[in-house]
Image: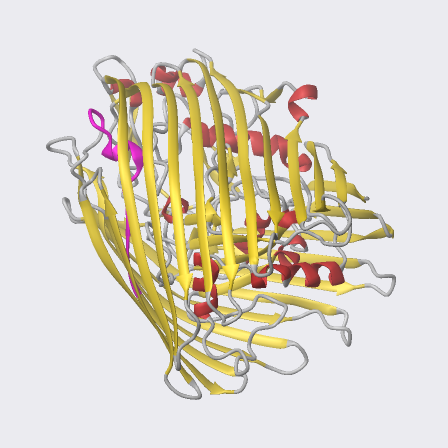
Amino acid sequence: MPDRRPAAPPHRLTLLARITLLTLTLSGPGLPSARAQATAEAAEAAGTTATTATPETAAAAEATPAPADRVTVRGQGLRPTGAGQRQVPVSELQQVPGGLGDPLKALQSLPGITSTHDGSSQPAIRGSRPEDNRYAIDGLPAGKLFHLGGLTSTLHPALVSRFDLQAAAHAAPWGNATGGVIDVRLKAPRTDRLAGSLDLGLLGGDLVLDGPVQPGSAVGVQLAVRRSWLDWVVRHASRGDEDGSDGTVVEMPAYRDWLGRLVWQPLAGHTLTLHSHGAVDRLDYEVPAGSIAGSQQPALIGPGRVRERDRTTALVWERRGRGGDQQRVALGQRDADQASRAGSVLDLDLAARFRFLQMEWRPAPLGRHSLSLGLERTWARWDYRMSLRDVRCTEFEPDCDYSSAEPVAADDHLRDRHLALWAQDRIALGEDWTLRAGWHAMRDAYLQRQVGEPRLALDWQARPRTLLSLAWGRHHQIPDGLQILPTYGNPQLDLLRASHLALSLAEQADAGWRWQVELYRKQLDGLVVADPTTRQYVNGGSGQAHGLELLVQREAREASPWSGWLAVSWAASRRRNDLTGVSFRHDQDQPLNVQLLARHRLPSGWSLGARWAWHSGAPDTAVIGTTTLADGRIRPVYGALNADRLPSYHRLDLRLEGRLRPDLSLYAELINAYGRRNVAGWVYSADYGRRTAQTQMGRIPSAGLKLDF
């Protein structure tokens, strides 16, 4: 169930986006760096969650292409499974240079995942928007997974085991997503003793505790808390007079997050978990009257702020029977609160409550069949008060004129019920063939829509170390929050639709080498556009994405000090406004993307890593002229939507890590080692007569210490 809350007015480069870019440019050196961790500890942790049963781990297990004794393409590295599926141990992501301690950001070094800015942790998967993805933590709703629109993720890598990534043709348990699915799998608590770590950095600090509440106890505890504190010592993230700035004055943002679990095993095969995770954000800014932004959009003049708080709490019961059957029940609540101001454009107060029930049953395998059944029910309520400029913009427009739009006010509440049912059967057709057939059904009471989604995957173990996999599925998604609200949006909108097709070939070679090549196609329909005649949101857009991806990896092995991977993606992503017939490149269209990562283990036990990234420049819409409105304001005249491109992007990141002593680790990174000034976009003068490049992160050193206890 999505968080369908009113958000900032849609815009190709919103004020909040500009603020985020400015903030990241300044605060980049203090972003949390990846924590060094011993290889043995990482390998042990990566396996601890393999015995935890949830509806979504069932999906991951059923995505395994053949019986476990036959599959040899899976190892300790990036773990290719079936087409569109990948399991990524967090130990791999922690060592990615330039990840800045954010495991979700490090995912961008994998094939098919893109981002248009250095500072954003939100992944765009195979031509879809980050908003089209679904995120979960151990199968539970992730809630607020990113700080301030993508500044950094709220995840702490110390408690994460792996990421189950489904880039295409999601398994049957997953619904309400036309992009990708990322399920964060957590480690099981330590059983030997209560341990922890303390990490103090430039931007903030964090504390981690993990282990039994007392020696020999059946109750384990895990807690990770983090707080930024750069706002205590630096007032301004941007004074508004830097090159490439539109004049906005930004205060240093502040955030905190937490993840905690109590895990109790009262009986053999039974586990009871009390889970809580959440995040809080604060950002203040001002658009002065004499600034470029204020001249172009007078409605933005004045103070602005963002306040967000999100919390998910759940109780989870899991059982594993001796005969191989499994059950899981999760009951929980998510609370999301927001207060945002943006001049006279936006004044919003929102309180949202989501109660959810998840149930899953996997009976013992019967003959050639491994069946899984599940249910997810959500009850939601939104209480909101807002005043918003009615711009009616989507991704199909190059710009939005807030100042010409009329304000719309609403003080109301909204209720909804969402039900999803799914079934999946993994059938061993023979010694080398496996079929995964599934069905996902969903019904949304507010939109009064119900759909069924077939999912199919066929895997062939052509040789003991070669896997060929074909996957296909249909998927639906509820439109964005503002677009379906009464007064402002259209509650009669239909669901967004997507069809995914993927073909994959993976092989495990000798000496720790493996490779995987995958071909995919994605068809999108029912996308939301603004009808120029009625000024109403309608399902009038479509799109497609297709591409070819190559991943070549070498695992870390005792016999060789070298490891790493090469990821190459060729792709094309387009959108079409079916009302006007105009077709254009999607914002995330990057035809060629290359990621080369190498790590060398030094004889002293330290390791040195390097990552070089290159990709085609992001699409851009050129200003080709101006027009003067009746109120005297100068407005831009745009060329064809996304017909231009920014300069190509490339940078080199370096990382050194190791242990000074058994309980003390050192990590050091140099981001953008050769100082490439990659262009994120353009800031135009008040009269649009000239433009200045808005550049991304410059050369940034980062270092830190982590103390284990």
Res. 332 image quadrant: top left
The count of marks equals 0
Instruction: Tell me if residue 522 can be seen.
Output: yes
Say if 93 sits above or below 676 in the image. below
User: In the rendered view of the protein, which quadrant contains the C terminus?
Assistant: top right
In the image, the segment drawn in magenta is 473-488
Which of the two residues, 210 or 32, is positioned nearer the viewer here?
210
Question: Residue 435: image x %, image y %?
Answer: 36, 77
Residue 614: in magenta span:
no
User: In the rendered view of the protein, which quadrant contains the N terminus?
Assistant: top left
Residue at (24%, 20%) from the top-left corner?
405
Residue projecting furthest to the left? 533
Which of the two residues, 480 or 396, is positioned nearer the viewer here?
480
Say if 696 sits above or below 574 in the image. above
Question: Residue 287: image x %, image y %?
Answer: 45, 16
Question: Residue 179: image x %, image y %?
Answer: 37, 53
Residue at (43%, 30%) from the top-left corner?
336
Residue projecting furthest to the front? 267
